Image (tube, rainbow, N blue to C red):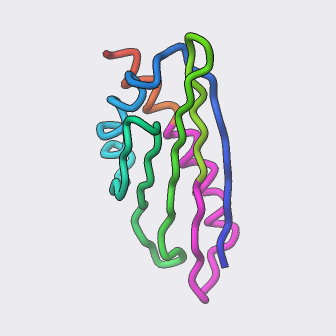
Amino acid sequence: MSFKKEDSSLLPYSRVAIMDAMPAVCEKMKWKIETLDKNLGYVRSRARESALSWGEIITINVKEHNKNSRVHVTSESFVTPLGGTVFSIIKNRLNLRNFFKELNKALEGS
């Protein structure tokens, strides 16, 4: 069984600047990047497994919107037969919140 959480944010940065920050942000989040396409504004990464989850797949899409960029993130977790439903829902939500926090920090520092 899997659980999915999505969120998006309009940021005052170019798609290029956001995509340039992705490797550092994913590393800070301890996500392993599987695919990064700067031209398409697409990132697919994987979060670690735990006792209650077989890990998460995080997809990030960045689209330019006038002089800003819309960042859309989906976190999908896969629970083990031992459970982890509530844990996965909370973890997905925290991952999205922390991702946008780290992305903003990285962009403000560039």
Quadrant where the image shows the N terminus? bottom right
Q: Reply above or below: 56 against 19.
A: below
Question: Which segment is the magenta one?
Answer: 75-99
The verdict on residue 7 being magenta is no
| Residue 46 image point, x, y percent | 42, 61
Picture quadrant where residue 28 is located = top left
Residue under the image location 53 percent in, 34 percent down: 62
Residue under the image location 62 percent in, 20 percent down: 65
| Residue 80 image point, x, y percent | 57, 83
| Residue 69 image point, x, y percent | 56, 22
Specify whether 37 is left or right of 1: left
Q: Reply above or below: 18 against 59.
A: above
Main secondary structure along the magenta-highlighted residues: helix
Front residue of 109/20: it is 20
Residue under the image location 40 percent in, 20 percent down: 107
Specify whether 3 is left or right of 52: right
Q: Residue furthest top?
A: 67
Front residue of 99/72: it is 72
Q: Residue furthest bottom?
A: 81
Quadrant where the image shows the C terminus? top left
